Image (cartoon, rainbow, N blue to C red):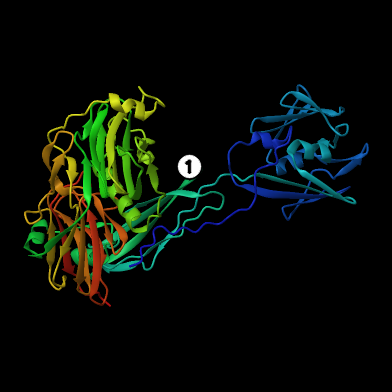
Amino acid sequence: MKLQIQKQLTKIVLGSMLLSIPFSAASAYGQDVAAQQNTVLLKSNSASIEFNGRLMKAVQPVTYKQGANFIPLRTVADLYGYTVSYDAATQESVVSKKGMELRFKAGTARYTLNGAKRLASGKLFTLQGSMMVPIRTWSEITGSRLEASGTSYSLSWKEEAKAVPPVAKFSTNKTVYKMGEPIEYSDESYDERGKIVKTEWTGLERAFFRPGVVHVTLKVTNNYGLTDSLTQEIRITEESMYTEEEFNRLFTPPGDKMTINGSSVLRMTKVPYTIESRPMQLIRSNSPEYFLEEGIAYQDSVSGKLRINIHNGNRSGKTLTIYLIATNRKSYPVTYNIEAFGKGGPTDYVSTSGKNAVARFLEDTAHGKPRDQVVLQPGESVIVLPEVSDTPLKPNLIMTSYTEIQTSDELQFTVAAVDAEAHPGQNIFGILPELKQLDRDGRHVRGTFQDADRSLIVNEALGYEEQRISIGDLDDSFLQGEDKLLGIPESNKGNTGVRYNVRVKVAPHTLIGLNARGGHYAGALLVNDRVVQAVEKSILKNPDELGILYRTGDKEETVDLALIVASGSNLPINLVFVPMPQTVQ
């Protein structure tokens, strides 16, 4: 199904702001609104004028006097959008617009602009009750371009187009649908003078499963804060094309979720697999999960290939700066390369921070550009992740990062939290020796672990029946390691930071999804090298939700899935493989 709710048709108006010259009307405009070009054509001794291609008649003809051509003030002021009035007490014609006031008085060659006297290019006069002003003077006041050709004259200027609301417009491929029939929406909204910056739908569903009339509303907002909305009726008949479950299995897009009977997942055939562990060191710095003060959160010396997961919130009441520091304790240079990095937060929600960090990390793993090698001289320290330390962690917010690093030899890595207000701009390397080691919180994980990459070997094609691969249950043990700060054993409870790789043959027309079994889950996977979130605009809240990952086509496929268990989420999870219903032709 083609759901086209992001399409936007936009018409473009060419132009720019008014010319900004001394004493011009341009000074009255401050809002950045698209400009429109205006032109008025005049001729000596004629009251006929042409404004933007439209013929009009002035209240008086263009009149030559005192060596200058004069035009009727009321007519030209109206064309420029000015308000014209008469002050009987001072016998002045008053022209005003957006905080700008001009005053003209017959019998004098002077006029005033916001109270300041200015000199006109000829003495002002009235003709049959109409104030006449020199064309040149008017062009100078308004910043207009004046051109003359014989007895013909033109004034051209650019002015702000009036901000107008956008136009909300959408269509559907039909107006009458069966229950469970896919609906295609096409957003055809446009804004001739601005830009649509917000689109809101009410009542939009990919399909409806009860007969009757439904109303779908589209509301659009432009960059001037103006809105427009459109509501359309869609009629649903009593005839059915798909049930809700059939429709969701067929059409819920990857990165979204559908409801599922959680107990039915456990009745699916559990797929046996063997685990092949691969070398990958994992450093986790997650205890204390919430910083109450500044200090060293974790420290260890490692070499080779490693993954570092830092996940913390701030309950210190102060803004903190989080550092990952590498120090060369060797007597010779040591190099390192960052091979992948992803950061989530700072944010209010632990699940959002973990999901965004792992999604960006996987994207960088699959498609990131190579980074420069860093060389550390003996005794030298560097900040490894300026992307993290340059982002202040304010009170009550959470930040997560995943990093993969390759070193040429042993380096000491330190995770530290520093009071940003107490040490503004101070060299972290001067502060580091004074920081105390932070205590564990008794619940969360910190430590160093080995073999943090796992391949799940499946020896059968999946999807010919309803099946599931369980990750993080009793058949999949947690990594065992050590808290190097205290020298005590540590279990990587939840296996956060562990990468699971699954390459599996999948039957045609199979839906692959992720089902959370241990509580909520918010993360991301690589599916054939494409990042798919679980899920994009929410989380998997309980076992009765299925995050959609992929659908196979008409042939059996080999599908590559890569999962890194996200910070803030819970195991176990199930990868679900279920046959899709047949499509209705």
Q: Quadrant of residue 421?
A: top left
Image height check: is 407 above or below 174? Answer: above
Q: Quadrant of residue 558?
A: bottom left
Q: Secondary structure at mark 1?
A: loop
State the residue at coordinates (58%, 41%). 32
State the residue at coordinates (74%, 32%). 23
Q: Quadrant of the N terminus?
A: bottom left
Image height check: is 232 above or below 143? Answer: below
Where residue 252 sits in the image (x, y, percent)? 26, 62
Along the viewing direction, whichever of 363 and 162 lies nearer the viewer: 363
Q: Is residue 90 left or right of residue 441?
A: right
Along the viewing direction, whichever of 168 and 440 lies nearer the viewer: 440
Q: Is residue 257 left or right of residue 233?
A: left
Residue 567 visible in rendering = no
Where residue 35 sits in the image (x, y, percent)? 63, 47
Image height check: is 116 above or below 243? Answer: above
Along the viewing direction, whichever of 397 and 164 lies nearer the viewer: 397
Along the viewing direction, whichever of 143 and 128 lies nearer the viewer: 143
Mark 1 crowd level (few <14, some 14–19, many ≥20, 10 Å Cα): some
Residue 546 visible in rendering = yes
Which residue type carries mark 1?
A: Gly
Q: Quadrant of residue 350?
A: top left
Q: Which residue is mark 1?
A: 225
Where residue 187 sits in the image (x, y, percent)? 43, 59
Q: Is residue 153 left or right of residue 570?
A: right
Image height check: is 3 above or below 478? Answer: below
